[in-house]
Image (cartoon, rainbow, N blue to C red):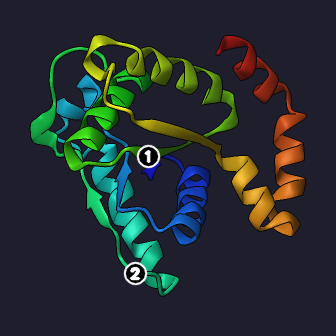
């Protein structure tokens, strides 16, 4: 199970964790932007992993094995969705996870699928047989808690901001 950043993604990741009980959980897996490195700020993975564990405790769920991307793993260059997915696929293979679930927001879903397919068809992953499933946080939450998330999701998908973001993606 792979969980990105943001509250909706974290909440959806928790629901998927409850349903699927994965071997391990990764909350983001990429290095920090330069301004965060200069400020010696924690990684998104450090923050979101702690939040995920806190949510597990609050919901009386078994605490999963969480792989945290530490500050020491920072490398020069951009950290983006494509790099994070590469890190996650490498980690999955290293840990013997041949089935990976990726949670993101709907507006990022298409590029997440595209980048993952690009990686899985590269020489590095050619014969590794990793299967990846994709989950849109809004859809997961609307399915599990329709009374709370259906109106919110409808409002989001109907917004001008969502349309602009979808076009940019």
Q: Is residue 64 left or right of residue 149?
A: left
Q: Is residue 43 left or right of residue 99?
A: left
Residue 126: percent from the left, percent from the top? 33, 19
Answer with mark 1 or mark 2, whichever residue precedes in sequence.
2
Q: Does residue 97 appear anywhere in the picture?
A: yes
How many circles with numbers are drawn on the protein?
A: 2
Q: Nearer the viewer, residue 91 or 29?
A: 91
Q: Does residue 4 appear anywhere in the picture?
A: no
The answer to which image quadrant residue 156 occupies is top right
Residue at 19 percent across and 32 percent down: it is 37
**SS under mark 1:** strand
- What residue is shown with label 2? 62
Residue 129: percent from the left, percent from the top? 38, 33
Residue at 35 percent across and 51 percent down: it is 26
**SS under mark 2:** loop
Q: Nearer the viewer, residue 148 or 134?
A: 134
Q: CA distance from mark 1 to mark 2?
A: 20 Å
Quick check: marks 1 and 2 in contact, CB under 8 Å? no
Which label number is shown at residue 99? 1
- Give neighbour class at mark 1: few <14, some 14-19, many 20+ (Cα, 10 Å): some
Quadrant including the C terminus: top right
Residue 155: percent from the left, percent from the top? 88, 44
């Amino acid at each position: 199970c792979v969980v990105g950043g943001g509250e909706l993604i974290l909440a959806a990741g928790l629901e998927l964790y409850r349903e699927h009980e994965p071997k391990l959980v990764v909350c983001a897996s990429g290095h920090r932007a330069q301004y965060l490195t200069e400020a010696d700020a924690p990684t998104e993975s450090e923050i979101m992993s702690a939040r995920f564990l806190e949510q597990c405790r609050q919901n009386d769920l078994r605490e999963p094995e969480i792989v945290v991307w530490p500050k020491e793993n920072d490398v020069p260059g951009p950290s983006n969705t494509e790099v994070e997915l590469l890190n996650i696929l490498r980690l999955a293979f290293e840990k013997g996870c041949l089935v990976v679930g990726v949670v993101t927001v709907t507006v990022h879903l298409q590029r997440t699928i595209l980048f993952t397919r690009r990686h899985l068809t590269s020489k590095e992953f050619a014969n590794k047989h990793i299967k990846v499933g994709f989950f849109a946080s809004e859809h997961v939450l609307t399915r599990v808690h329709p009374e709370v998330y259906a109106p919110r999701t409808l409002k989001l998908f109907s917004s001008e901001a969502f349309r602009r973001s979808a076009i940019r993606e």
